[in-house]
Image (cartoon, rainbow, N blue to C red):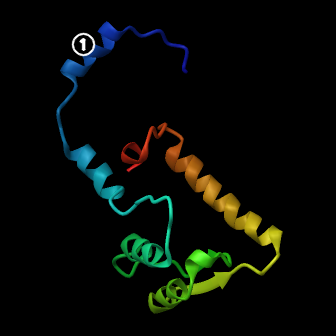
């Protein structure tokens, strides 16, 4: 994409000389340890993801979410127990959902901009 023509032979030569330090890979894996995916999120799954995302009292002040049924009663209770202020968007207020959707979109673009996920295992 940068306009450089590189042959497979050049890359294979470089790969043999590349350092075999596993530390950067371990740091990347430890960064991604709590991001899981599922086709059908439930409220208990969401609560577990929140607990894993904010493990050491490093929680945000606010959490914005809409009135989707998957949040149920467990998610607001778990959020309150973690000392996070629950901020729900208003019912039938599309401009507020747009703010939340825009934030989610920006996170997806920033985090997944450098890879193409082929399947669930590859995304994990």
In the image, residue 36 above or below residue 109 = below
Q: How many marks?
A: 1
In the image, residue 10 above or below residue 111 = above
- Residue 13 position within the rendered picture, expressed as x and y whole percent measured from the top left: 24, 13
Foreground pick, 26 / 94: 94
Q: Is residue 28 left or right of residue 103?
A: left
Q: Residue at x 55, y 14 (%)?
A: 3
Foreground pick, 110 / 91: 91
Q: Secondary structure at mark 1?
A: helix
Foreground pick, 83 / 69: 69
Q: Residue at x 72, y 78 (%)?
A: 89
- Which residue has dot 1 on it? 13
Residue lying furthest front: 40
Q: Residue at x 47, y 38 (%)?
A: 115
Q: Residue at x 47, y 9 (%)?
A: 5
In the image, residue 10 above or below residue 53 = above
- Residue 70 position within the rendered picture, expressed as x and y whole percent measured from the top left: 57, 75
- Residue 38 position within the rendered picture, expressed as x and y whole percent measured from the top left: 45, 60
Image quadrant holding the N terminus, namely top right
Q: Is residue 29 left or right of residue 99?
A: left
Q: Residues within 10 Å of mark 1 (few under 14, many from 20)?
A: few
């Amino acid at each position: 994409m940068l306009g450089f023509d590189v042959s497979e032979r050049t890359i294979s030569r470089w790969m043999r000389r590349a350092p075999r330090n596993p530390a950067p890979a371990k740091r990347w894996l430890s960064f991604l340890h709590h991001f899981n995916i599922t086709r059908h999120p439930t409220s208990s799954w969401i609560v577990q993801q929140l607990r894993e995302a904010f493990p050491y009292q490093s929680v945000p002040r606010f959490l914005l979410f809409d009135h989707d049924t998957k949040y149920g009663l467990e998610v607001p209770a778990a959020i309150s127990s973690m000392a996070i202020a629950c901020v729900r968007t208003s019912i039938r207020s599309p401009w507020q959902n747009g703010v939340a959707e825009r934030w989610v979109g920006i996170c997806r673009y920033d985090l997944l901009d450098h890879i193409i996920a082929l399947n669930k295992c590859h995304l994990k």
